[in-house]
């Protein structure tokens, strides 16, 4: 069983954990919390636990002796020790999962200006921050960490809830609704009432992508890069490929429609659809030519551009092939720079594009 020991100067604050899901989990003995008052271990007659900082400066520092004695009183052999600190690594969901795997956890809550540095070394503590702001003490961060890690202890939350929550999938969660169907003239989206599981899943996935892109571009870029895949194009994709090009390819002539369909049909084996799960977001056309391969076309929907998918596709091509060619617009200076960095050089040009070639240099 996970046992969390909290070293604090303000034990009364932890009564806030005695509510809701955490209270039930404690009652069911799914994990245990042991709050230790550091002040009880002070050797000072007035139970003083803080002193002025060496070297001067504002505020007080928590002294080493009461903390180290409080820690030793726990008599633990190899606990996971956390010191809540704005200097620490930023706490996240995967840390919450990792921490929950430990049997004995000790969380030291700082106060005032922090703790004597020697305590951190003696306890072998990992410094963990809950965000880029300064709080009065480590008690609230400790409760944040305990709440998040407790959710990952077997039996505290049902597993399906955990799987669908923000961060577990790499995306933020889709919007949720409950009864009534209409509230202040706002209706629940129809699809959620349809009973069609596939449509509901697809709507939720779209919304999760949209919200993640809007609020956490960093997570969105990572998700796209980790989850895109290339699927062989099928004849049912002809129209889609043509309309992609019609709407988006800069030098596409409207009257070229038939010619394009014919070209795609003839070369369908060279086309691959770029997809994230079942969502089609673009295509590539990769052909074998004399001495290597040619990335003849690459199109990515506007919403998914600049997410490293294109770069990743090209990086994989140069990893897998000794010689790679591609065409790039002369005015796309950013792409030209990127390709040059990957080792491409210009070998040919027409009025609007450069042809670039990558040749893998064999190691001597
Ligand atoms: C006022 S803060 C001390 C800040 C410290 N002087 C500094 O600049 O890094 C007092 C205590 O609150 C806790 N604390 C404050 N902000 C925190 C955060 N963002 N994450 C984790 N702990 C925090 C730490 O335990 C810290 O020792």
Image: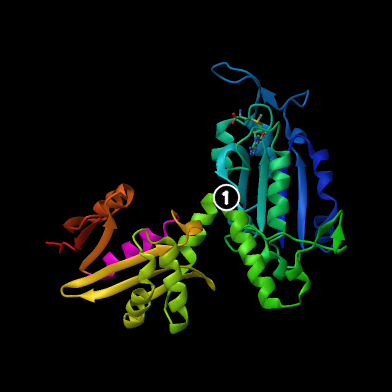
Q: Nearer the viewer, residue 216 or 189?
A: 189
When asked about the image quadrant of residue 171, the answer is bottom right
Q: Residue 35 at x, y = what percent? A: 77, 45
Identify residue for label 1. Answer: 216
Q: Is residue 74 visible?
A: no
Residue 174 among those drawn in magenta: no
Q: Looking at mark 1, is its residue's CB closer than 8 Å to ligand 1?
A: no
Residue at image point 63% right, 34% down: 133
> Could you say which is closer to the camera, residue 6 or residue 301?
301
In what quadrant does ligand 1 lie?
top right
User: Split into 4 quadrants, where in the image is the N terminus?
Assistant: bottom right
Tell me the residue at 63%/60% (across/down): 208
- Residue at image x 47%, y 61%? 301
Q: Element type at marker 1?
A: loop
View extreme (top): residue: 56
- Magenta highlight range: 307-321
Is residue 63 shown left or right of residue 193? left
Q: Quadrant of residue 291?
A: bottom left
Q: Quadrant of the C terminus?
A: bottom left
Main SS category, magenta section: helix
Residue at coordinates 59% horizontally, 64% vertically from top-left? 169
Magenta span includes 315: yes
Q: Position of residue 238 (x, y in %)?
A: 43, 78
From the top left corner, tell me how far across and down residue 2 is, in percent. 70, 59
What color scheme is it?
rainbow
Front residue of this view, candidates 235 and 25: 235
| Quarter assignment of residue 172 | bottom right
The foreground one among 45 and 128 is 128
């Amino acid at each position: 069983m996970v046992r969390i020991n909290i070293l604090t100067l303000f034990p009364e604050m932890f009564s806030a954990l005695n509510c809701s899901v955490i209270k039930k989990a404690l009652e069911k003995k799914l994990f245990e919390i042991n709050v230790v008052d550091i002040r009880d271990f002070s050797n000072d007659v007035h139970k003083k636990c803080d002193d002025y900082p060496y070297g001067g400066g504002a505020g007080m520092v928590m002294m080493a002796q009461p903390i180290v004695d409080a820690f030793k009183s726990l008599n633990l052999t190899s606990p996971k020790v956390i010191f809540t600190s704005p200097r620490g690594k930023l706490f996240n969901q995967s840390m919450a999962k990792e921490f929950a795997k430990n049997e004995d956890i000790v969380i030291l809550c700082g106060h005032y200006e922090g703790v004597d540095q020697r305590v951190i070394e003696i306890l072998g503590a990992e410094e963990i921050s809950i965000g880029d702001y300064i709080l009065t003490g480590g008690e609230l961060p400790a409760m944040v960490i305990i709440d998040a890690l407790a959710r990952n202890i077997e039996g505290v939350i049902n597993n399906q809830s955990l799987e669908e929550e923000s961060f577990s999938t790499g995306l933020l969660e889709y919007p949720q609704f409950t009864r009534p169907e209409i509230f202040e003239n706002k209706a629940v989206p129809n699809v959620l009432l349809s009973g069609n599981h596939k449509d509901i899943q697809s709507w939720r996935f779209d919304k999760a992508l949209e919200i993640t892109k809007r609020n956490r571009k960093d997570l969105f870029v990572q998700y796209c890069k980790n989850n895109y895949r290339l699927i062989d194009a099928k004849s049912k994709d002809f129209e889609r490929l043509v309309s992609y090009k019609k709407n988006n390819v800069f030098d596409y002539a409207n009257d070229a429609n038939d010619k394009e369909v014919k070209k795609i049909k003839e070369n369908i084996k060279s086309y691959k659809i770029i997809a994230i799960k079942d969502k089609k977001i673009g295509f590539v056309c990769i052909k074998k030519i004399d001495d290597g391969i040619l990335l003849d076309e690459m199109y990515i929907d506007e919403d998914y551009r600049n997410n490293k998918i294109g770069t990743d596709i090209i990086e994989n091509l140069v990893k897998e092939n000794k010689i790679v060619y591609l065409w790039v617009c002369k005015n796309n200076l950013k792409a030209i720079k990127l390709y040059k960095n990957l080792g491409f050089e210009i070998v040919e040009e027409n009025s609007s594009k450069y042809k670039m070639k990558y040749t893998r240099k064999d190691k001597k």
